[in-house]
Image (cartoon, rainbow, N blue to C red):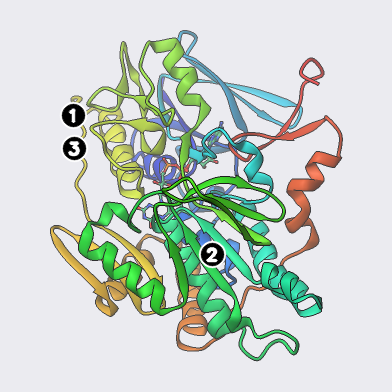
């Protein structure tokens, strides 16, 4: 019988694992909670109106349609039974059980609010298309409401954007909101001047982009200041509510930053499937809930289960796309018959954009900042965007936004903005899971 391989997730790990098994003599079933592959590094461009969601989220089914040994199932994986070798997934009221001989789990990570999940209501994270569209509505909506407001204090609150977390996502988001206010929206309003918007980037750490090292951190911080972003480091966020963000400085002094639109770009927490697998296999989990794999990405006593990407903890490798892609390809090679060997991540470098024409990049010991780094960023992203169509339209949109001043994707519907709150109104049938998924509660749980 042909070997059955089940892959959980359609992100970088899941999709690249499936692609790596293209010519293998195996039956592949890829199960994911979304029908698309998501290019998370460009979510901030969806949130700020540069790109459409379709450009960064092609249908997984379409990407894999020529891969005859692979089928794609939509479903939320709720249970992996390592003894029975089955994966149970749910789609609304339908439960599907899929058996496997080999399993690759790449279910990624969700947002962590460090035990303050109620912050999510006021400060959406940046993990999904839903998050990005909700934030797009809040960002553009803030300018719209400010145009109508008459109280100067209210206008200030509406035009203050707080981004929490000064890693790559936070820096990119703060930089883009500032460019939106100071460049793209200039001249669009009659009562307010969008250039007066305040963009505040807050982090408990003492540098922005801490993992890039001193020189690039300093270059990014300077560029952020040049484009009008207020950077508050060594600052702890102690509360987030409707009115704004309460912060505490190093001396314990607290203050409120009044703000309508808040973005959470700090902290990740691994998929709950990591804990489930750990409980069944005896593997450990780390503080972020990631499962500690063996060197070859398998689990103790289970050479048939591979865990890759953001939900796995191995050798301190970072939670970046290349670790997921290379880990997935490594697992696929073993499934295709190569003897198991330790997975060694080849660091191809890291980069983050701060504003148009300005990025920082660290590639094989070489450090760049400014225009050269931005060109590198551009080239790498064009290569890794999935699908020819998406590449072409993305480049066109970049022309519109970076050479011109336009933002082609400013649509935000009421449903996108209010969905999170609306879900709380529909009663107890549905709930928003900790990983951002909409789940139907069972009668027992209600
Ligand atoms: C805003 C943002 C910006 C980023 N920028 C960069 C960057 O510039 N460079 C870089 O290298 N990395 C970046 N990253 C990190 C990078 O995107 C991740 O490291 C990468 O996506 C990890 O791949 P993965 O396959 O492990 O997880 P993901 O890509 O998150 O995929 C997880 C998949 O599993 C599915 N899933 C989860 N739970 C279940 C379940 N229970 N049942 C079924 N399916 C499930 C999800 O739907 C998804 O398809 C960024 C991440 C974010 C959020």
* Residue to which mark 2 is pinned: 55
Q: Which mark is residue 372?
A: none
Taking 166 as reference, is 76 left or right?
right
- First in residue order: circle 2 vs circle 1: 2
Q: Position of residue 416 (x, y in %)?
A: 73, 57
Taking 73 as reference, is 153 left or right?
right
Residue 258 appears in the rendering: yes
Residue 377 appears in the rendering: no
The residue lying toward the viewer, choosing from 193 and 167, is 193
Query: Which type of secondary structure does the marked residue at label 2 adopt?
Result: helix
The residue lying toward the viewer, choosing from 357 and 208, is 208
71 vs 370: above or below = above
Query: Which type of secondary structure does the marked residue at label 1 adopt?
Result: loop
Cα gap from disc 1 to disc 3, whole angstroms: 6 Å
The residue under the point 72% across, 71% down is: 153
The residue under the point 35% across, 47% down is: 320
Q: Which mark is residue 344?
A: 3
Q: Position of residue 74 (x, y in %)?
A: 62, 38
Q: Position of residue 203 (x, y in %)?
A: 43, 53
Q: Do labels 3 and 2 touch, CB within 8 Å?
A: no
- First in residue order: circle 3 vs circle 2: 2
Mark 2 surroundings: few (<14), some (14-19) or many (≥20) residues within 10 A: many
132 vs 333: above or below = below
* Residue to which mark 1 is pinned: 342
258 vs 77: above or below = below
Which residue sits furthest top? Answer: 83
Mark 1 surroundings: few (<14), some (14-19) or many (≥20) residues within 10 A: few
Cα gap from disc 3 to disc 2, whole angstroms: 31 Å
Q: Do labels 1 and 3 touch, CB within 8 Å?
A: yes
The residue lying toward the viewer, choosing from 38 and 31, is 38
The residue under the point 79% across, 56% down is: 415
């Amino acid at each position: 019988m042909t070997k059955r391989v089940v892959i959980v997730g359609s992100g970088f790990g899941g999709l690249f694992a499936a692609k790596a098994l293209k010519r293998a003599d195996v039956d592949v079933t890829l199960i994911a909670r979304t029908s698309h592959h998501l290019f998370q590094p460009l979510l901030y461009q969806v949130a700020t109106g540069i790109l459409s969601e379709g450009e960064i989220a092609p249908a997984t089914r379409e990407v894999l349609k020529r891969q005859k040994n692979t089928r794609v199932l939509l479903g939320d994986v709720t249970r992996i039974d390592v003894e029975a070798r089955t994966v149970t997934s749910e789609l609304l009221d339908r439960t599907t059980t899929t058996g496997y001989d080999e399993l690759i789990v790449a279910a990624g990570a969700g947002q962590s609010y460090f035990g303050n999940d109620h912050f999510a209501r006021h400060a959406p994270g940046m993990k999904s298309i839903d998050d990005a569209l909700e934030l797009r509505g809040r960002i553009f909506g803030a300018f719209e409401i400010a145009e109508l407001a008459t109280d100067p204090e209210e206008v200030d609150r509406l035009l203050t954007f707080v981004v929490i977390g000064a890693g790559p996502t936070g820096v990119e988001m703060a930089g883009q909101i500032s460019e939106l206010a100071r460049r793209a929206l200039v001249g669009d309003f009659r009562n307010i001047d969008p250039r007066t918007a305040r963009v505040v980037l807050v982090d408990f750490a003492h540098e922005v982009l801490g993992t890039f090292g001193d020189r690039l951190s300093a270059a990014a911080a300077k560029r952020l200041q040049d484009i009008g972003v207020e950077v508050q480091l060594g600052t702890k966020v102690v509360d987030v509510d409707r009115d704004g963000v309460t912060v505490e400085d190093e001396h314990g002094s607290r203050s409120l930053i009044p703000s309508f639109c808040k973005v959470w770009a700090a902290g990740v927490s691994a998929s709950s499937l990591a804990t489930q697998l750990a409980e069944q296999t005896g593997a450990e989990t780390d503080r972020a809930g990631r499962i500690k794999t063996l060197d070859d990405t398998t689990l103790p006593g289970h050479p048939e289960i591979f865990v890759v990407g953001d939900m796995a903890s191995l050798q301190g490798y970072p939670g970046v796309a290349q670790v997921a892609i290379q880990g997935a390809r490594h697992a696929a090679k073993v499934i295709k018959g190569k003897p198991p060997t330790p997975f060694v991540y080849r660091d191809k470098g890291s980069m983050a954009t701060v504003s148009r024409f300005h990025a920082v990049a660290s590639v094989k010991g070489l450090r760049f900042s400014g225009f050269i780094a931005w060109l590198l960023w551009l080239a790498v992203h064009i290569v890794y965007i999935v699908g020819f169509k998406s590449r072409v339209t993305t480049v066109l949109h970049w022309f519109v936004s970076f050479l011109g001043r336009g933002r082609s994707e400013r649509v935000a519907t009421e449903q996108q903005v209010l969905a999170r709150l609306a879900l709380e109104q529909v009663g107890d049938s549905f709930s928003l899971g900790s990983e951002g998924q909409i789940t139907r509660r069972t009668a027992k749980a209600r």
